[in-house]
Amino acid sequence: MIKNLLQRGLLALALAALPLLTTAPAAHAAAAQPAAVAAASGLRAPLPLFEAIDQIPVADEHREGYKRDLYKHWNRGLNTTDGCDTRKEVILSEAVQEPQVAAGCRLTGGSWLSPYDNLVIVDAARLDVDHFVPLAEVFDSELKSPEGARWSAARREAYANDQNSPDTLVAVSAASNRSKADRDPAEWLPPAADYHCEYVAKWVGTKLRWDLAADEAERQALLGVAEDCPNTTVVYEPAP
C-alpha cells in the first residue's frame, strides 16, 4: 500500500527538485531544471514570490452561502483499493517514519513533523490534514465564470481531495490547524517563524493552481511577508 501511495509523491518529487527556498549559489541550478520538468508535467517555471503574488487576481470576498459540506471530503483517495481515504493517504505520504497499517487503514507508530509549529508528532490521531487554503477561503475566493456560475460540485471535490499537488493538503498538528481555522495570511501565520516564507509561497502557489482570488488585505499581507523572502520562488501546476 505504501508503494501505491507513491503515486501522490511523483509530482512532489518533481517539485522537490525546484526548492521553494533557494539560495544564490543554487539559482542557476534551479533555473536550469524547470524546462524539462514543465515539459513532462505541465509545471510552471519558478516565479519570484513578488511576481507570483502579482498574478493573483484581487477581488472582494463573498462568504454568503458557504457550507463546509459543499466540498465533499474525504474521498477514497488515489488508491481506491487500499482502504485508506484521502486524509489517511496524505498522512501516510508525509510520515517521517512510516507507521504500521492495519485493516481499515488503522495506523500505529510512525512519526511526523508538523511544519506549522515544528513539532514532532508520534501519534497519527494528533494530526489534522489541513487544506492549505481553507475551504471557506476557497469559497470566498472562487472566481465566477463569465456567466456568473460558481464552481461545480466536482471541482470542489477535486480541490478538497487534491493529492496531485504536494501543497494543497498538509499533515499538521491538530492544535496548529485549529489555531489557523479558516483564516488567511492577513489574520494568521504559522507559529514557526522560519516557515513563513515557505508557507506564503505554498499559499500563493495553491491560489494560482486553482485560479483563486485574494482580497486587498490578504494581498498586502502576502507582500509584507515577501519582503523578508528575497530568494523564495513559487512553482505550481494549474489544476485541470
Image (cartoon, rainbow, N blue to C red):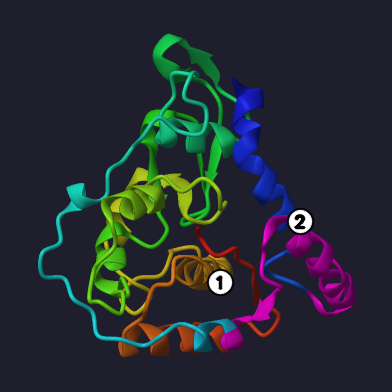
Q: Which residues are magenta?
A: 23-51
Residue positioned 40% across, 90% down in the render? 220
Which residue in the structure is indicated by mark 2? 40
Image coordinates for residue 181, horizontal then vertical, percent: 27, 58
Q: Is residue 79 visible?
A: yes
Give the amino acid at mark 2: Ala
Image coordinates for residue 182, horizontal then vertical, percent: 27, 62
Q: Which residue appears farthest toward the top when viewing the image?
A: 103
Residue positioned 63% across, 36% down in the render? 7
Q: Quadrant of the N terminus?
A: top right
Which residue in the structure is indicated by mark 1? 201
Q: Real-space Cα distance between discs 2 and 1? A: 22 Å
Decide: few, some or many residues near mark 1? Use Cα within 10 Å; few <14, some 14-19, many ≥20: many
Frontmost residue, 141 versus 178: 141
Query: Where, by quadrant of the figure, is residue 219 drawn?
Result: bottom left
Frontmost residue, 194 versus 53: 53
**Vertical arrangement, residue 29 with respect to residue 120, above or below:** below
**Vertical arrangement, residue 107 with respect to residue 9, above or below:** above
